[in-house]
Image (cartoon, helix red, strand yellow):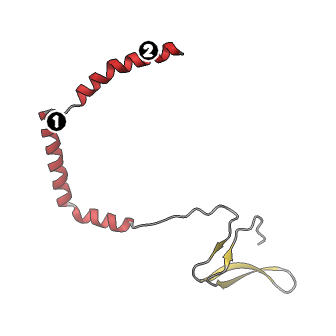
Amino acid sequence: MTWLVAILTALLQALLPWLAKKSKSTAEDADADSKTRDRLRDQVRKHWFVLIIVLLLSGCVRTVYVPHGTPVRLRETVKDVKVWVKDADGKVIAGTMDLPEGWYALAVETEEP
């Protein structure tokens, strides 16, 4: 294992100076960079309204993960929710109701339609 580390160390010592030399910018690199920068500025000037619309439509949305089986408390009343309720005989029937603010909602493992 030590021989592998020694080989990798020798390779890195040989390659790092070469990579550092290649990564230094030259006058040509700076000129190409300024051309690219100018092209991008022109594109932004032409299409600024699209960028603003995209930024406004993206908005700030925060998603909160609630694990299965964890109760949540309703922050506002939810109107006309389709629910299953039991009648006087214990028979399950379909209905609708408003779930008021402050009630808790919890997923049920087995649903009884």
Query: Front-most of 68 and 23?
Result: 23
Which residue is drawn at the image coordinates 14% and 50% (left, top)?
A: 38
Residue 7: which disc? Answer: 2
Rendered image quadrant of residue 87: bottom right
The three-letter code of the residue at mark 2 reads Ile
Q: Distance between the residues labelled 2 and 1?
A: 34 Å
Q: Earlier in the sequence, mark 2 or mark 1?
A: 2
Q: In this view, does 79 lie to the left or right of 58?
A: right
Count neighbours of disc 1 (C-alpha within 10 A) and say few if under 14, some if 14 to 19, many if 20 or more.
Answer: few
The correct choice, above or below, for 10 with respect to 50 in the image is above
Residue 29: which disc? Answer: 1
Residue 14, horizontal then vertical, whole percent: 33, 17
Residue 109, horizontal then vertical, whole percent: 76, 64
Residue 36, horizontal then vertical, whole percent: 18, 45
Q: Is residue 64 left or right of residue 20?
A: right
Query: Front-most of 13 and 87?
Result: 13
Which residue is drawn at the image coordinates 28% and 26% (left, top)?
A: 19
Residue 83: which disc? Answer: none
Query: Front-most of 98 and 23?
Result: 23
Point out the residue furthest to the bottom here. Answer: 88
Mark 1 element type = helix
Q: Is residue 45 left or right of residue 83?
A: left
Which residue is drawn at the image coordinates 24% and 66% (left, top)?
A: 49
Screen quadrant of the C terminus? bottom right
Count neighbours of disc 2 (C-alpha within 10 A) and say few if under 14, some if 14 to 19, many if 20 or more.
Answer: few
Mark in front: 2 vs 1: 2
Residue 6, horizontal then vertical, whole percent: 45, 15
